[in-house]
Image (spheres, rainbow, N blue to C red):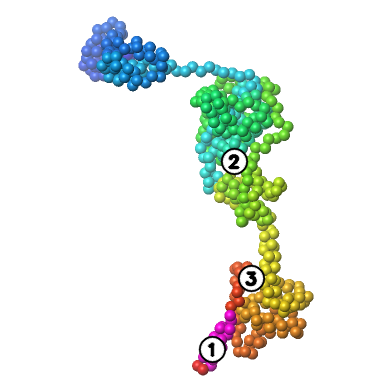
Amino acid sequence: MQPEVWAEIKRLHAADKVPIAEIARRVRRDRKTVRRALAAQGLPVARVQPPRPSKLDPYKPWIKERLDRYPDLPSTTLFEEIKRQGYAGKIRIVTEYLASIRRKAKEVFLRIETPPGEQAQCDWANCGSVRIGETWRKLSCFVMVLSYSRLMYLEFTLSQCLEDFLGCHVNAFKYFGGIPKKILYDNLKLVVLSRLGTDVRFNPKFMEFSGIHGFEPVLCNPARGNEKGKVESGIHYVRSGLLAGREPLWPDINAQARRWLDETANVRLHRTTRERPVDRWEKEKPRLFGLPSKPYDASIAKAVRSSHQALVRFDGNAYSVPHVWAYQTLLLRADSETVALLGQGKEIARHPRSWGRGAVIEDPRHFEGILAAKRKASASKLKEHFLALGPIAQAYLGGIIQAEGEPRRHVARIMELASAYGKEEVIEAMRHALAYKAFGAAYVQNVLLQRRTAKGLKEFLPLEIPQKPAWNEIVTEEPDLALYDKLSGQDAEDGHEA
């Protein structure tokens, strides 16, 4: 019986003169229990009942011996073994007994402190999603902590790719003013490709990075996250101190993170060291390795192919290149701010990086030469079709060039007349105009219409498509217009008879 219940029973009976039945109701105990409490001069002591004999008792010494040799033997195996020795009980008794003797004591962890400059710990943290325009993207947080001083660096990213991972390392080293001797990781795929016991296969690109910067990557034992408890505590502090109650906005969250590091996280009195991380860092900084003289390029580098629209697709967006580089294989380099495109070893385009999705980022200068090139190609094709009309066309073109400043306009108009009235009529009209040295589309049209009027034939107006000027220059096979002339003449006769 709990002491407070016993004291309440005594008080109700002695002070308030409450009947035993009412006391039992109030303290929710049996009347016999209340009477025993009133009769006792002190707090009743519960009697320990001797354990009841069990069918398993004769076999317990043998089970203990087996478990000393084979600690992981399952209850089913032991049950079958003792059954063959004459055990007549149920497996439930065996299972309960094993559970009672196999209770593991909670593991005790040693506090490990490292000398200044000896170690840092590093990890990623998943931080939900952030809205960019009409798109949601996953937000990650890179965290590195110097083990001695507890000075922390953090940076938010929109991916956990190797290039972002290495770039965050470079930024952390700059923030720390140096590089620690070792960096502790768990089994990140960015660091280790495979692991079987002590056989570890590191990521070659990451090992190249560590060799350039002179630190040794060290792996935690599998499922032993406590071994990098400093960075785990740092991640918890980021979530509870920086992100709690805040809706992150990209890219403002990184500027907020930097202020939080400088004004809060690294100047607080640390709970374990009882010193400020920035103060301990002053002692640790001289022990850090110096930064490489040549900055490490952690940008994304990949081969891409430009489309027929002179666009290159990357990370859900499209970026323009000069139109002469359409249909080409190019090298793309991207960092957190820019996307650069290289062709034949030289930079041909540079754009601000878009973190949304579905955007088309264009430089108007990339398309300046397209219209001029198309007009030039169109003029060349138009001339080719005009000269195909024969020697008269070639002679007439020479006259147009000498007489007019815009021969293309006259040639285009004469080809329109050829499409409307047929090549033969136009050639004859040019022959007549050439004899009188009358050069120009207007002269050819006048000759053509005079001859058709003399024959009693109607004028055909050429089809113009102002919305699609390029379609006006499409050249098709010449139709047989005699049928139309015949029909036009027949219509005139029918109208006269009417």
Q: Which residue is mark 3?
A: 473
Residue furthest out toward the front:
84
Residue 397 as seen in the image, left or right of residue 475: right
Count residues near mark 2 (Cα–Cα under 10 Å), then give few for <14, some for 14-19, many for 20+: some
Distance (Cα) linking label 2 and label 3: 51 Å
Which kind of residue does numbered mark 2 sit on? Answer: Pro
Which kind of residue does numbered mark 1 sit on? Answer: Gln
Instruction: Indicate the quadrant containing the N terminus: top left, top right, bottom left or bottom right.
Output: top left
* Residue extent of the magenta highlight: 480-496
Any magenta on residue 471? no
Q: Between disc 2 and disc 1, whose residue precedes?
A: 2
Which kind of residue does numbered mark 3 sit on? Answer: Glu
Question: Of helix, strand and loop, which one carries label 1?
Answer: helix
Residue name at image x 65 percent, y 81 percent: 424
Determine the main secondary structure of the stretch shown in magenta: helix
Question: Of helix, strand and loop, which one carries label 2?
Answer: loop
Q: Which residue is mark 2?
A: 251
Residue name at image x 68 percent, y 81 percent: 427
Residue 123 as seen in the image, left or right of residue 283: left
Q: Position of residue 370 (x, y in %)?
A: 67, 60
Q: Between disc 2 and disc 3, whose residue precedes?
A: 2
